[in-house]
Amino acid sequence: MKIGQIHTAAGVVAVAHTPEGTRHLKGRADMRTILESDQDLQELILEDFVDEADAARQAPPVLPGAIIAVGLNYRDHIRETGLETPSTPLLFAKLPNTVIGPGAGIRFDPAVTGQVDWEGELAVVIGKRCWQVDQADALSHIAGYTVANDVSARDLQFADGQWLRGKSLATFCPLGPILVTPDEVPDPQALALTTRVNGETVQSSSTSEMIFAVDELIAFCSRHFVLEPGYVLLTGTPWGCGGFASPPRFLSPGDVVEVEVSSIGTLVNPVVGVDQ
């Protein structure tokens, strides 16, 4: 099942994307409310079709309660950076209010940062509460998968020694375009991941390059803290980030970033001026 969210006069609501068109869901609730109520996404009741103009007003597929991210989780990214391979997942957080949806602008103040970088990623949306979950059972706690861009201010990230500030500037977590349920993504470790900047491919890899697979990440996290329904787990980025290129390359207003993950879709966001 493919589920997205749209902006309406009454607020953000979840909708189903079907071959016939976009349809409302019974209850007109947002995705986080649906997940927190423990509803089975496969049993959601479809109602009338969404007006075409309303369907175009896309919102992020979920507005998460928390964002947990993983650094240095791709073998090709380790080779690119020359850094040591982590022995356990390297976790950090992004503030939830960094999330923006498809088509929304990535904004930054050049007086704050001059090194804004892209990181195309597979994002996991938690569907069931996870606490001390075994790896063998971890995937059953997933509501679905979506696409993320873990936008990063490299100068702030590396100046601080910890990553919260450099990862959490406003608009620095595009998510979308939709959430795809696990029945349509049977193997999250067999997905192609591509990032393009202004049409040029800058990242081209596979989730098979992950050091810690999705089920390992969920099990590891749940041994240390609770993952609640609606939380988002960013699973890491492959080689091809601009900050590690020679010479380094960073985003500027006017650029367009596309992140594509096979079986899910393509997330597109322009980079705009801070006042736009």
Image (spheres, grey):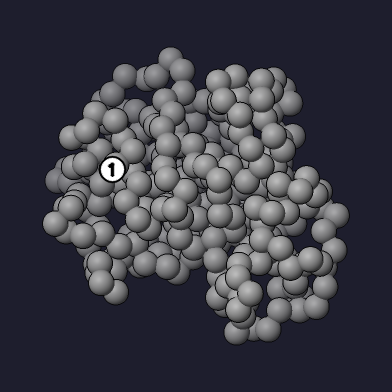
Residue occupying image coordinates x 68% and y 84% = 51
Percent x, y for residue 155?
18, 42
Residue 240 visible somewhere in the drawing: no
Residue occupying image coordinates x 54% and y 60% = 60
Percent x, y for residue 97?
44, 53
Looking at the image, residue 61 sits to the left or right of residue 91; the answer is: right
**Quadrant including the C terminus:** bottom left
- Which one is nearer the viewer's eye here, 11 or 163? 11
Percent x, y for residue 43?
85, 54
Residue occupying image coordinates x 45% and y 42% = 205
Q: Which residue is mark 1?
A: 166
**Quadrant including the N terminus:** bottom right
Badge 1 local density, few (<14 within 10 Å), some, or many (20+)?
many
- Which one is nearer the viewer's eye here, 273 or 10? 10
- Which one is nearer the viewer's eye here, 256 or 28? 28
Give the answer, above or below, for where 15 lies relative to 228. below
Q: Secondary structure at mark 1?
A: helix
Q: How many marks?
A: 1
Instruction: Inspect the image, locate mark 1, and give the three-letter code of the amino acid beneath it.
Output: Gly
Residue occupying image coordinates x 66% and y 25% = 131
Give the answer, above or below, for where 34 lies relative to 77. below
